[in-house]
């Protein structure tokens, strides 16, 4: 009888932990002042260089304009992804979210740039459907 209660308690803890993790990693949240924050980790499977893993982003949007785009931890080659982070991501700030596809990638970091573009597309589609 005690073993059953222990197993049930353990199962409840696992479920509670999974629910807490889901809430923590919500795809989109609405912040004060009408700002939306979209996390692409679970909505985009685009892989970067050598297919080592996803290239997730956090996209912040206010009044249908991009405020910022931040790269999340990834397995891209740091030397090349730094160029994407420094040269490509800042170009999104201030443009209409609908115009996200107008931003060019970084020469020499094409696969990483393409993964960023796919993440932006996924973020935009999610935002359109769920805001």
Image (cartoon, rainbow, N blue to C red):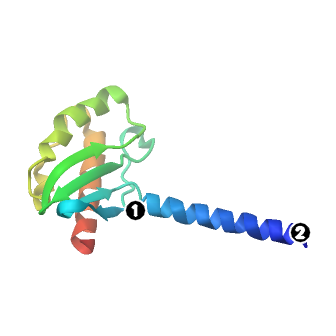
CA gap between label 2 and label 1 equals 36 Å
- Residue 82 horizontal side relative to residue 16, left or right: left
Is the residue under label 1 in contact with that under label 2 (CB below 8 Å)?
no
Which residue has dot 1 on it? 26
The numbered mark, 2 or 1, whose residue comes first in the sequence reads: 2
Image spot of residue 106 (x, y percent): 19, 36
In this view, the residue farthest toward the top is: 79
Image spot of residue 85 (x, y percent): 25, 36
Residue at left offset 31%, top offset 49%: 57
Residue at left offset 74%, top offset 67%: 9
Residue at left offset 54%, top offset 66%: 19
Dot 2: element: helix
- Residue 70 horizontal side relative to residue 1, left or right: left
In this rendering, the answer to whether 52 lies above or below 38 is: above
Residue at left offset 24%, top offset 71%: 131
Image spot of residue 29 (x, y percent): 31, 63
| Number of residues whose C-alpha sits closer than 10 Å to that of mark 1, classed few (under 14), some (14–19) or many (20 or more) | some
Dot 1: element: loop
Q: Nearer the viewer, residue 69 or 50?
A: 69
């Amino acid at each position: 009888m005690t073993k059953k209660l222990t197993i049930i308690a353990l199962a409840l803890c696992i479920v509670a932990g999974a629910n807490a993790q889901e809430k923590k990693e919500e795809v989109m949240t609405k912040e004060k002042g009408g700002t939306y924050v979209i996390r692409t980790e679970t909505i985009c499977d685009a892989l970067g260089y050598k297919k080592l893993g996803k290239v997730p982003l956090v996209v912040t949007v206010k009044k249908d304009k991009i405020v910022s785009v931040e790269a999340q931890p990834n397995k891209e080659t740091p030397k090349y992804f730094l160029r994407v982070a420094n040269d490509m991501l800042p170009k999104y700030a201030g443009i209409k979210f609908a115009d996200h596809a107008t931003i060019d990638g970084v020469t020499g970091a094409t696969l990483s740039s393409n993964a960023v573009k796919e993440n932006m597309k996924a973020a935009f589609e999610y935002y359109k459907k769920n805001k």
